[in-house]
Image (cartoon, grey):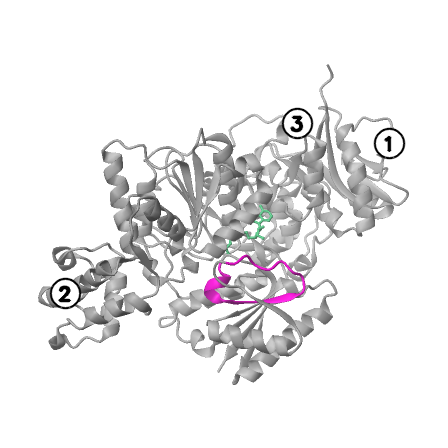
């Protein structure tokens, strides 16, 4: 029986496909399905490209006008669809490319072949054109040796450069890099892992650190002619996908822009699959693909490590996000896999657990309402007037110290560390304050109410006791947690108690820069979650342009940000892969002027970009009241609007402008975003950390353009 040849698609092919007119797209799709079924069919004529540097690149005819470019090596029964375009453009593309296997990592790479003395992209022209021969050798171009500026990668050997993904042909060009701008100029021409490795080295990392965090092996003997094996490396999988049947081909080609489903960054790829001996924590700035890796991890766990009636629990902070993630998971997973994944925000899970155990308390989410308000007022009535502490002190103390740390007795309160609380309390004062909290909890109990942190703590206790008695435990094979920074200590302790300590138990993703509920700061290690040896980071921002990312990061300059454990995190090492205009900043002194500016931005985008859809726009405001004013004014201006509220799926209509608060916009993304914030949010960072994090979250929702309106 003859074995079917391997057919693969490149990421570039799909990017290109997405740009074609729809009539051409359907022709290419039909053709590609036939090609996948039998690339050796006599109907497919592989034409030689005379000027091609790589003799293995062939042109194939889709119709009179359109040509596909296929890589068809002599050895190995493999066919890779690389590109599609009009005849002449397709040939030009092929003439300047070659496919090579990196001799150190074994990854298959599409290498852009350079001409003599040719700058790669405009950024390099601005920096310093470097004369190179084809193929480039690893020698530093002569004129750069005379330049006094140090070379960023001079100390690295060829082997080290290639181990990070630099193609052999590009060693000389990379060696010539002296500035970050020059490196950025090479970004579009280098494989993603090479660019990432180089900017991490430029930021101060060592090659060993880069390779360790990526789990890249560089000790194997590589056969640089074995393309079938090369296709299987994680680096290759970030740009090529092997397609086994028609169905897979159709699914991929019908959604050419849903690249996150197919091409994972090598680090995402490694984190998504394989066994881990205990809890994993993945950090990454906004848009670095944390939710994507969490979804792929849940899929892998459901398909490979979930048995019988078990499920993978995928949890996050808000209901909106859980709904959004469930929708995305449905596009990633088969119905069979989906049946093994439960997506629920933690509070909904807690509510369900309490009901299933007939625990009759209701959860307090808002202390200013109904029974909780009465309970709080009754508690304040017992306060010791001689202390002269304002009611806000009691509320903050209760939230940030008592609830957050799960303090239940006066003795515990005497001993607890009150980090970050301004007022120093002697033991005697603590004794005098404590009755307020005791009274509040008593009042809640008599009303069958419970604070959510207390509910987390109580459920964790129940689960631990059941486990100690040898109970069956919860029906989960693993828990995947998104937006970890929003979970406080009691929530983390509950998550720990929900899973026995075993391989693959907990998988956390998060970003301290996006913690917008400050009382939720927690250190995982203090909640029984040991991530040593399993802490990873994602650095490439797939969502926002580098201009928007930089502007967002600048908002947090000088602010101390944690790594969800006991350490610090920083934004210096992150980079975006796309570019665009810097955010527009507008200062206004009235609501009318702010609304007019927002409407002008939308109008400008509509004129500027024929493809702009209102549905890809969101106005993000600092409060519900401001959000509602803007939505109302947009309606009066004749625009259709949709407010993003709790517990609702987001409208997918292409013609409505979305409106959200900064809290509600978390985890979402839009092509264009208008952020409306009081000017006070931009005051001294020492006083505005919370507000600046909100701004960071809001601005990083934008994929392409952002307008920031400061209201006076
Ligand atoms: N490997 C990938 N290839 C292409 N696109 C990707 C990849 N990974 C992520 N993306 C895209 O990047 C964007 C951001 O991804 P995601 O929402 O997972 O990031 P995040 O780190 O969770 O962001 P945030 O913390 O801001 O919510 C999404 O549009 C996603 O589809």
Query: In whole angstroms, how far apart are the C-alphas of marks 1 and 3?
Result: 22 Å
Question: Label 3 CB, ligand 1: below 8 Å?
Answer: no
First in sequence: mark 1 vs mark 3: 1
Coordinates of residue 298 in the picture (x, y in percent): 48, 40
Q: In the orientation shown, which residue stands out farthest toward the top? A: 1
Coordinates of residue 412 in the picture (x, y in percent): 15, 55
Residue designated by label 1: 45
Task: Tell me the quarter of the picture where residue 244 sits.
Answer: top right
Q: Nearer the viewer, residue 93 or 633?
A: 633
Residue at image position (62%, 75%) is 635
Q: Residues within 10 Å of mark 1 (few under 14, many from 20)?
A: few
Residue designated by label 2: 435
Number of the front mark, 2 or 1: 2
Q: Nearer the viewer, residue 146 or 28?
A: 28
First in sequence: mark 2 vs mark 1: 1
First in sequence: mark 3 vs mark 2: 3
Question: Label 1 CB, ligand 1: below 8 Å?
Answer: no
């Amino acid at each position: 029986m003859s074995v079917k040849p391997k057919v693969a698609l490149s990421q570039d092919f799909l990017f290109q496909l997405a740009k074609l007119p729809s009539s051409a797209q359907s022709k290419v799709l039909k053709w590609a399905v036939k090609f996948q079924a039998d690339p050796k069919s006599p109907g497919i004529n592989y034409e030689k490209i005379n000027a091609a540097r790589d003799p293995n690149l062939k042109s194939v005819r889709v119709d009179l006008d359109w040509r596909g470019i296929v890589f068809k090596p002599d050895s190995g029964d493999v066919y890779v669809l690389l590109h599609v375009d009009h005849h002449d453009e397709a040939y030009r593309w092929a003439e300047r490319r070659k496919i090579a296997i990196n001799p150190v990592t074994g990854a298959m790479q599409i290498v852009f072949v350079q001409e003599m003395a040719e700058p790669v992209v405009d950024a390099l022209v601005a920096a310093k054109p470097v004369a190179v021969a084809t193929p480039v050798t690893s020698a530093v171009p002569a004129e750069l040796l005379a330049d006094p500026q140090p070379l960023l990668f001079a100390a690295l050997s060829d082997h080290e450069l290639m181990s990070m993904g630099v193609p052999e042909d590009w060693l000389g060009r990379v060696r010539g890099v002296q500035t970050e701008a020059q490196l950025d100029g090479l970004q579009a021409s280098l494989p993603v892992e090479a660019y990432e490795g180089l900017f991490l080295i430029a930021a101060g990392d060592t090659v060993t650190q880069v390779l360790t965090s990526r789990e890249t092996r560089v000790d194997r003997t590589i056969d640089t002619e074995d393309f079938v094996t090369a296709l299987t490396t994680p680096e290759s999988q970030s740009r090529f996908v092997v397609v086994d049947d028609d169905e897979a081909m159709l699914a991929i080609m019908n959604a050419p822009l849903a690249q996150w489903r197919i091409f994972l960054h090598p680090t995402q790829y490694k984190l998504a699959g394989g066994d881990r001996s205990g809890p994993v924590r993945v950090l990454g700035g906004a848009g670095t693909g944390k939710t994507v890796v969490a979804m792929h991890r849940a899929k892998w766990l459901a398909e490979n490590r979930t048995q019988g009636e078990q499920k993978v629990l995928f949890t996050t902070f808000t209901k909106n996000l859980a709904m959004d993630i469930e929708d995305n998971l449905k596009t990633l997973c088969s119905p069979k896999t989906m049946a093994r994944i439960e997506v629920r925000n933690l509070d909904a899970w807690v509510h369900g657990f309490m009901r299933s155990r007939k625990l009759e308390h209701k959860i307090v989410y808002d202390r200013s309402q109904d029974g909780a308000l009465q309970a709080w007022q009754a508690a304040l009535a017992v306060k010791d007037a001689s202390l002269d502490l304002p009611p806000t002190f009691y509320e903050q103390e209760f939230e940030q110290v008592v609830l957050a740390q799960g303090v239940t007795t006066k003795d515990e309160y005497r001993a607890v560390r009150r980090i970050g609380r301004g007022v120093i309390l002697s033991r005697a004062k603590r004794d005098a304050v404590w009755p307020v909290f005791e009274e509040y909890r008593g009042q809640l109990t008599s009303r069958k109410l419970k604070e959510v942190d207390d509910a987390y703590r109580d459920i964790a206790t129940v689960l631990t006791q059941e486990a100690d008695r040898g109970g069956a435990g919860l029906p989960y094979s693993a828990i995947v947690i998104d937006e970890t920074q929003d979970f406080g200590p009691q929530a983390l302790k509950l998550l720990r108690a929900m899973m026995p300590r075993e391989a693959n138990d907990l998988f956390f993703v998060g970003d301290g820069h996006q913690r917008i509920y400050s009382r939720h700061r927690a250190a995982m290690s203090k909640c029984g979650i040991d991530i040593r040896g399993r802490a990873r980071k994602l650095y490439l921002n797939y969502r926002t342009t580098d201009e928007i990312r930089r502007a967002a990061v600048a908002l947090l300059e000088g602010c101390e940000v944690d790594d969800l454990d006991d350490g610090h995190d920083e934004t210096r090492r992150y980079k975006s892969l796309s570019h665009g205009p810097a955010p527009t900043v507008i200062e206004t002194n009235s609501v009318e002027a702010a609304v007019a500016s927002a409407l002008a931005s939308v109008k400008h985008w509509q004129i500027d970009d024929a493809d702009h859809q209102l549905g890809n726009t969101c106005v993000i405001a600092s409060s519900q009241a401001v959000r509602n004013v803007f939505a109302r004014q947009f309606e009066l201006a004749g625009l259709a609007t949709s407010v993003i509220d709790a517990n609702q799926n987001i409208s997918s209509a292409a013609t409505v402008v979305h409106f959200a608060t900064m809290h509600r916009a978390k985890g979402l993304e839009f092509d264009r975003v208008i952020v409306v914030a009081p000017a006070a949010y931009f005051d001294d960072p020492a006083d505005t950390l919370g507000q600046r994090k909100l701004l960071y979250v809001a601005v990083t929702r934008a994929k392409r353009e952002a307008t920031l309106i400061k209201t006076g």
